[in-house]
Image: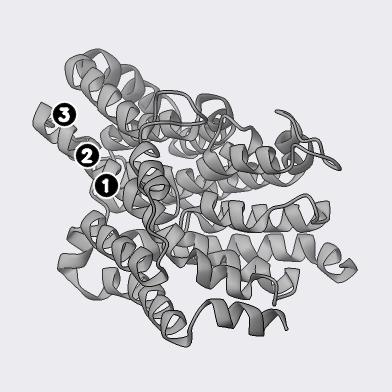
Amino acid sequence: MLFEYAYQELSLYVIILLSLITVLTLILPFAIKIVNDQLELFFLVMGFAAVTISGVWSFELVLNAVKAPLTVGGLPIGIFQVVLIFGLLIHYFNRRLYPPITRLFERLSTKLFYFLMVLLLGLFSSVLSVIVTAVILSEVLLILPVKREDKIKIAVFSCFSVGLGAGLTPIGEPLSTIMVYKLSEPPYNADFLFPLQHFGIYIVPGIVILALAASILLGRRVSRHHDVRESYSESVKGIVMRALKVYIFIFALILLGDGIKPLFELFLNLVPPMALYWINLLSAFLDNATLTAIEINPNLALSQIVSAIIALLISGGILIPGNIPNIVVAGRLRVSMKEWAIIGVPLGFSLMVLYFIVLLPVFLAL
């Protein structure tokens, strides 16, 4: 009966078209170079198409999409301002900011440097916010005297860590803010410490594992090359354009998430928690805050909430659109979707399998 009711609300024609948009969004950035080069515009087109097909256009939706890159948790500062302001600060003060980082890298072993970077940025992202942490990470990676392919590898590991760590407090990222808001009523009465209390036991070990993996798997294979250290060359115009691209990307993800939302809601209540865990892989290219708003409610058992949120946090690192750190870092280092996926897909799937095994007793008990 549930499916029949939902099906009446969402026609077969709309289901097919929204499914097609989902598939195209996943495939075209890898298959067509111009799509990969203009990823922000592509997601904007897909977002417009999804919202139009699902018929959810509204003034409130447009306003939310316009405001999303400009605000975080109701504060009048968002990813657009942070990327722009930090970009300008680094433009004018890079000669003072860069030398301490390069000296630290030269004094420490690569293994230790990678371990500390992935660990500390992952833990501090819950306090600094995922946006500020992402900007710091992108600038550190830019000047490391290692080859570009090594920068991409450590960038992906670091973004997984930052994305996980941001889930520890409502300050970290919108996902946590929305979760706390939706669970603020009984029986959970969620407050500021709710994510840390219930997710810390899963997230902190995950960050440590990522730091150790980066140190062991990447650190030993890196050769330091002083001749590949990038000198600062970004113009003010380039900084403004980069901030605008980030703005468009976030705007597009809000539209895409709300446009595909009816399709996701159609099947949400038809799948068991174990299957939903894997369905949340959609967070690799959809706004995980939107999926959190759809899935999380006070009627769920705590174990269901934990498994859903963990899956969303991990999946966000798999592809560039999945999380704010990915978007910021990929934009600064000019990483393509394919380059990111080569590292992000196997790493993300490995983490999903690891956490699935850890959460298996929970799934079996439901």
Q: Nearer the viewer, residue 170 or 260?
A: 260
Helix or strand or loop: what does disc 3 sit on?
A: loop
- Contact? badges 1 and 2 (CB < 8 Å): yes
Kindly identify the residue that appears in the image at 59 percent across and 74 percent down.
266
Q: Horizontal placement of 299 versus 243: left or right?
A: right
Q: Pointer 2: what residue? A: 244
Q: Position of residue 20 (x, y in %)?
A: 38, 80
Label placed on residue 248: 1
Q: Nearer the viewer, residue 310 or 351?
A: 310
Q: Position of residue 181 (x, y in %)?
A: 66, 38
Categorize mark 3 by other alpha carbons within 10 Å: few (<14), some (14-19), many (20+). Answer: some
Kindly identify the residue that appears in the image at 45 percent across and 66 percent down.
260
Residue depth check, mark 3 versus mark 1: number of the one nearer the observer: 1
Question: Label 3 is placed on what type of residue?
Answer: Tyr
Q: Quadrant of residue 190?
A: top right
Categorize mark 2 by other alpha carbons within 10 Å: few (<14), some (14-19), many (20+). Answer: some
Q: Pointer 3: what residue? A: 232
Q: Horizontal placement of 114 versus 231: left or right?
A: right
Q: Position of residue 273 (x, y in %)?
A: 74, 68
Q: Position of residue 264 (x, y in %)?
A: 55, 69
Residue depth check, mark 2 versus mark 3: number of the one nearer the observer: 2
Residue 155 shows in the view: no
Question: Label 1 is placed on what type of residue?
Answer: Ile
Question: Label 2 is placed on what type of residue?
Answer: Leu
Of the 4 image quadrants, the one containing the N terminus is bottom right
Of the 4 image quadrants, the one containing the C terminus is bottom right
